[in-house]
């Protein structure tokens, strides 16, 4: 599992950590029943606060991708497998948008808007 | 081929032949186990001796042959095959000499309890086995270790302010780990059996062995692998042993494919001249070369990403001093 953060980016660090892990889940490199590494180790290696990493794990928990179990730490849920399946659709969508000359930001904002309407 | 197959079969045939020829002279039951003092303390029928001769004389070398011949015939080359051949020859000699001399010294006895000490026979068998094993080594053709190329991908495109870490937990496949723990459990059961029997000293030995083997298995079958700005580290789930290469010491990193049996003579933590391997399975592995030329090989999935990150961090550290946190 690869976790990358850019301190100079506008996105908050914990969001970047969560995004890294989410990407690995979508790519199938992190699978259901895998254990996430200890937050302490990740924080030490990245040179960030322990609570920043914990917050990232909580974001993933809130999204249903990770289960925090006593004594076992953060365990990846089957939902991560669904995410891997979704990745196929995402790649197709990205390819079609690129063929139309659409930027990543434009596509992202369209996706965001459509989700707002579907949730209403 | 000759040493691992022909020799054991020939020796075992001779052993069995001799014992059959002597059977008229031997007491029944015959001594088949001796205690620390050398005196006989375990007895069995001749049929047991035949079975033991076959199992030790052919079974063990057969196992060595079985695990290496398929690869040899396919063209794999490795010094570890020569070791296996020597071991097969040595073990078959040990079994043959020990069996024949320990039986031979009981000829003419009415009762096996009166038999002489086994130490001279054992000493002779061990010396012969070592001599033959060494001879077998020189008899076999030289095997140069296969040098498999290292694959390099592009280093990771790390931005200036970017930090990254790559982590993975590797472990021996469940069935094999279960097999190892079954041995531990077996030793534990042995201890319980001795305890029930009242021989507490043997029980403690078995219990100690069970605990020791259990610890060693636990410490060497699961590892946490990490690549970050300190370098690459491979740490046992139990905390020790720990291995790794500091970032400043990384001369090269890439992807290779390993076969535990051919490349390292087995799986687990394996030390060869100039190479240390943490081999949990066959297949894709991260290979890191130190500035002194020695290498560390760790079997991991997604090795290209690990290598790419390590190379990127190493390149960056040479341009800018490491960030101290």
Image (cartoon, rainbow, N blue to C red):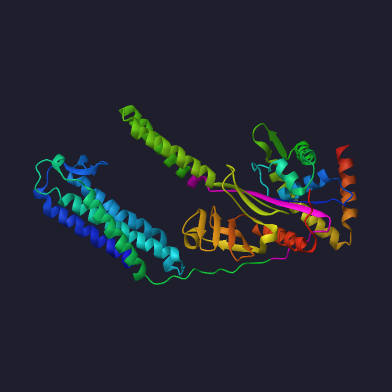
A33 vs B134, left or right, is: right
Kindly identify the residue that appears in the image at 88 percent across and 53 percent down.
A107
Q: Is residue A1 above or below residue B181?
A: below
Q: Could you say which is closer to the camera, residue B313 or residue B20? A: B313
Query: How many numbered tags mark residues here?
Result: 0
Query: Where does the N terminus of chain B fall, quadrant-wise?
Result: bottom left
Asked whether residue A85 appears in the rendered view, the answer is no
- x then y, percent, for residue B182: 44, 40
Instruction: Give me the residue at 38% from left, 33% from top.
Output: B204
Q: Is residue B187 above or below residue B161?
A: above
Task: Tell me where residue B317 sits by quadrant.
Answer: bottom right
Residue B2, image x and y in percent?
A: 31, 67
Residue B87 coordinates in the image, percent (x, y): 36, 59
Look at the image and give the residue range highlighted in magenta: B153-177
- Residue A37 seen anywhere in this rendered image of the structure: yes
Looking at the image, residue B184 sits to the left or right of residue B94; the answer is right
B98 vs A82, nearest the viewer: B98
Q: Which is more toward the observer, B210 or B263?
A: B210
Query: Residue B268: where, in percent of width, then height?
Result: 51, 52
Residue at 34% from the left image edge and 35% from the top image edge: B202
Residue B173 lies within the magenta run: yes
Q: Is residue B261 left or right of residue B205?
A: right
B196 relative to A76, above or below: above
Q: Is residue A3 magenta?
A: no
């Amino acid at each position: 599992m690869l976790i990358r953060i850019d301190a100079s980016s506008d996105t908050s660090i914990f969001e970047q950590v969560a995004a890294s892990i989410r990407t690995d889940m979508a790519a199938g490199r992190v699978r259901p029943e895998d254990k996430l590494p200890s937050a302490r180790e990740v924080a030490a290696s990245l040179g960030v606060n322990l609570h920043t990493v914990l917050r990232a794990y909580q974001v993933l928990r809130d999204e249903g991708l990770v289960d925090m179990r006593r004594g076992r730490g953060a365990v990846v849920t089957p939902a991560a497998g669904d995410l891997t399946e979704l990745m196929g659709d995402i790649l197709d969508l990205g390819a079609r948008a690129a063929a139309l000359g659409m930027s990543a930001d434009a596509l992202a904002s369209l996706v965001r808007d459509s989700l707002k309407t579907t949730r209403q | 081929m000759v040493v691992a197959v022909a020799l054991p079969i020939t020796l075992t045939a001779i052993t069995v032949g001799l014992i059959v020829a002597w059977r008229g002279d031997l007491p029944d039951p015959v001594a088949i186990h001796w205690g620390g003092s050398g005196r006989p303390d375990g007895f069995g029928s001749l049929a047991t001796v035949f079975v033991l001769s076959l199992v030790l004389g052919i079974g063990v070398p057969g196992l060595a042959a079985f695990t290496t011949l398929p690869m040899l015939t396919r063209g794999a080359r490795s010094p570890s095959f020569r070791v296996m051949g020597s071991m097969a020859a040595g073990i078959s000699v040990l079994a043959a000499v020990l069996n024949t001399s320990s039986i031979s010294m009981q000829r003419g006895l009415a009762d096996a309890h009166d038999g002489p000490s086994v130490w001279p026979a054992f000493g002779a068998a061990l010396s012969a086995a070592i001599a033959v094993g060494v001879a077998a080594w020189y008899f076999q053709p030289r095997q140069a270790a296969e040098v498999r190329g290292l694959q390099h991908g592009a280093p990771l495109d790390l931005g200036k302010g970017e930090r990254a870490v790559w982590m993975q937990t590797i472990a021996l496949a469940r069935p094999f780990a279960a097999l190892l723990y079954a041995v531990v459990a077996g030793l534990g059961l042995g201890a319980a059996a001795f305890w029930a029997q009242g021989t507490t000293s043997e029980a403690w030995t078995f219990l100690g062995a069970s605990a020791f083997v259990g610890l060693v298995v636990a410490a060497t079958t699961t590892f946490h692998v990490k690549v970050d700005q300190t370098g690459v580290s491979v740490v046992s789930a139990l905390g020790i042993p720990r291995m790794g290469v500091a970032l400043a010491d990384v001369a090269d990193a890439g992807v290779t494919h390993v076969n535990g049996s051919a490349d390292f003579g087995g799986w687990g933590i394996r030390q060869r001249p100039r190479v240390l391997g943490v081999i949990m399975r066959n297949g894709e592995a991260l290979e890191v070369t130190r500035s002194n030329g020695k290498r560390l090989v760790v079997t991991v999935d997604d090795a290209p990403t690990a290598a790419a990150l390590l190379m990127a961090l190493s390149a960056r550290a040479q341009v800018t001093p490491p960030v101290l946190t």
